[in-house]
Amino acid sequence: MTVNAPDSNEQVSAFVDGELRGPARDRVVDALYGSSELRRAWAHFHLIGDVVRKIGPVPGAGSIAGNVNAALSAEPVVPFEPRPRRPWLVPLPGLAFAAAIAAVAVLGIRSLDDGGVQPPPVAGASRPEVEATSSLPAAPDPAASRIASAAAPPAGSEAARRRWSDVAPNAEARLNVYLVNHNEYAGNGVRGVLPYVHIVGYQPAAGDYR
Amino acid sequence: MPDNVSDRELVERVQRGERKAFDLLMLKYQHRIAKLIARYVQDPSEVLDVAQEAFMKAYRAIPKFRGDSAFYTWMYRIAINTAKNHLAAQARRPRESGLDVADLEQFDGIPELKEYVTPEGLALTEEIQQTVIAAIDALPEDLKVAISLRELEGLSYEDIARVMECPIGTVRSRIFRAREAINARLEPLLD
């Protein structure tokens, strides 16, 4: 250490009080590493504080550091370990992101479905095939239509070929009128301008009414 | 407390693998930790053993010390736990003391009952205390006020400078000169 001893001792005194900042602090710690005299001053300055505050001294306690050092010298140097993250927190950002995407997807699909942006199901159209055993058309509720769609047999199957237009053409005609009228007057559920825009999907079937 | 800044610096250095920084922490706290353990453990030689064990445990655990509390708070808990474990292990052996761990817990608030005393230890302790007090009394007034405000009141240099109406550099110099003067009287006792 190139600094003279009195100055170093004053630096040590300031470090004892936590009053050194930045490079000066680093320098004094490095000086303490290299000088047993400075370490002795460091220990005594703390002991003076302990005595003034009546928390010292303890006979023999001055040898503790030396004994521990001797015992630790046989041990490997403690490697730096980065602060461990709480394991249950690790997947949270990914989960939160996935949940947000799922919520947006669900809400988006719901609003699209409920809002009638898609053309409402019309009896006789290509999508809402109904089992021939259904004697009456389902209620013109989009939700019911969705259920019907979901329950619809795959295209090309025997059930799919049995359409309203084949099975009950009169009922289909009545239902078409009802759906058209309903969609003209009912809001479509989408917020903003869309509630006032009525979207009607209609595909005339064979033997359509006029 | 501003000296927590020094502790943090030293802890970070230990965590970077600088064992000498841990030596500085031990030199700083060895009397306080021994005093704390002496409230639980009666035998003076065992006090030193338990204190050493506590510091060893702290050294091994310091990579996991996250700095959520002050280093001394963390060290305090390790020391208390080590002392209790020592007493529990002692209780499993044939009893030399009439107290068990639960009894000793109650003595925590009454340190006088647990203070271990040997004639030599008591004599040296008293001599050190008297020497320090006499050295402070002999200090010039400005040094005495500065060291008292720092050690007894725990004021920062900035606050002491405000109280004493002098620059911070002067406070630092006064505190250092006070310590040097006290240490000059103390050195012969600690050799």
Image (tube, rainbow, N blue to C red):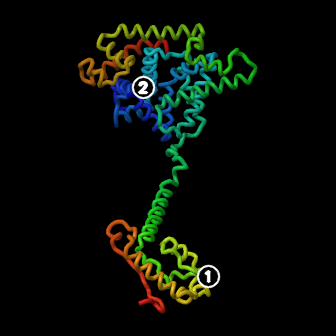
Q: Chain of mark 2?
A: A
Type of amino acid under label 2: Leu
Q: Position of residue A9 (x, y in %)?
A: 37, 24
User: Is disc 2 placed on a helix, strand or loop?
Assistant: helix
Residue placed at 52% from the left, 23% from the top? B30
Q: Chain of mark 1?
A: A
Q: Is residue A119 above or below residue A47?
A: below
Question: Split into 4 quadrants, where in the image is the N terminus of chain B?
Answer: top left
**Disc 1 marks which residue?**
A133
Residue placed at 34% from the left, 22% from the top? B155
Q: Which mark is residue A38?
A: 2
Q: Position of residue B19 (x, y in %)?
A: 51, 35
Q: Position of residue B99 (x, y in %)?
A: 68, 16
Classed neighbour count for the residue bearing mark 2: other residues with Cα under 10 Å, few (<14), some (14–19), many (≥20)? many
Query: Exactly how many numbered labels are in the figure?
Result: 2
**In the rendered image, residues at marks 1 and 2 fall on the same chain:** yes
